[in-house]
Image (cartoon, helix red, strand yellow):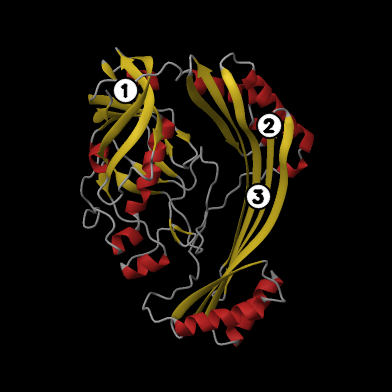
Amino acid sequence: MSNYNKWIELGLKKGLSDIEIHINEKVDLGLNVYEGKVEQNEISKMQTASIKGIFNNKAANVYVENLTDSNIELMLDHLLDSAKNITSNEPAIIFEGSKEYVKINEPIFDFSKIDPKDKVKLLLDLEAGIYKNEFVKKVSTTFYGETELKTTIINSKGLNLSRHSTVATIYASGVYEKEGQIKSGLSYQIVKNFNEINVDKLIDDNIKNGTSQLGAKTISSSKYPVVFDNEQFGNVLAVFATIFSGEAAFRNLTKLNGKQGTKIASPIVNLVDSPFHEKALMKVPFDDEGVACETRHWIKDGVFTDFNHNLKTAAIFNTKSTGNGFGRGIKATNLVLEPQEYTLNEVLDTIQHGIYITDLVGLHAGVETVSGDFSLQAAGFEINDGKLGRPIDMIVVSGNFFELLNNIEMIANNLIFGLSGVGTGAVKISELTVAGE
């Protein structure tokens, strides 16, 4: 910490009116097993730093790996040169700190203390377990990774914050074949404690996901009631999250401009930025600009509340930052679609004939975030009299995100935070256009 203070003093002596140093220290481990042999065993350690400074009311940033006493002066000189050449009138802000920060008391698990042989054994057991299935053709990937991240923010206005997190991910991808038809199965777990990894469940999930789609065929084109599984609806929400940002509002890249306080979704929709959610893997006390994070509705009872802001867009719109300044933009902490009390089976029970979607392809190429239009290749299962029936593939679901929000009829209580980082249960849509045969 003494080095940071010394570097700040040096920046002020060089003529900066304010200066902030943001340090990320990251350690990554990656293990990969293929055909019973370790193919990858890599550890990487990296420190990245960004320095933000204000000179003549112009804010500039420089980025460097491994900021040290030997290169700090050069970086500060680059920062000053950049600030002197800025001609835009964007707000120049370095944050003095929030009044209060939520203290995170979760224990940090030290994955490095686990014997590396135990990590390899997990992957070998996972691969071998999947290979026991009669339909598996190949296990293409078995991977274990862990990440430790420490973030420090300190500035000339007295801000001094740090956060620390560790997480491990294990996943497998299998290829399954029956009567010439090939399907893939993916299973994964993201954990905060090594002892939470359940290899048997990973094996079962992989086999189920891979074999359940064998024999899939398309379905007649029509409009159907549709249930998105929790993972896939989380992916949909993640893709459209950008339209709720102040950056999108400023650049007129969202249809939500001027819609604050108006109904944009079904009354049962409560979309919440929830930095301290009990099921979230990461609890986030402050954003990358040092602003305290807070639980905040994006949509409350179907009504759009307001945009999310970092310091820059908050100044432009004459409001306060919502604590969503991450990276070089605006992002959610833990976005959650609040569930209802229904189980998945209770949701399915309400459908006489419909479709349950478990896979979506083209979530970037097939989505237009400004208009809300989407057209996505999908797969899943037919629903008949409230029960899951035959597998379905080679269909395309089309619609509009804003209409989708208004057509949400039920939200199941099987909430998970998937790979997208969004938490939701399965969601029933009253009607959606499906193109098949």
Q: Which mark is residue 34?
A: 2
Q: Which mark is residue 415?
A: none
Look at the numbered disc 2 and give the secondary structure of its residue.
strand
Q: Is residue 308 visible?
A: yes
Front disc: 3 or 1: 1
Q: CA distance from mark 3 to mark 1?
A: 40 Å
* Quarter of the figure with the C terminus: top left
Q: Residue at x 54, y 75 (%)?
A: 157
Q: Disc 2 or 3, which lies upstream in sequence? A: 2
27 vs 353: above or below: below
Q: Which residue is label 1 attached to?
A: 355
Q: Residue at x 29, y 32 (%)?
A: 397
Tell me if mark 1 has few (under 14), some (14-19) or many (20+) residues whose alpha carbon lies within 10 angstroms of its own.
many
> In which quarter of the view is residue 167 placed?
top right
**Is 181 in front, or is 230?**
181
Q: Disc 1 or 2, which lies upstream in sequence? A: 2
* Quarter of the figure with the N terminus: bottom right
Front disc: 1 or 2: 2
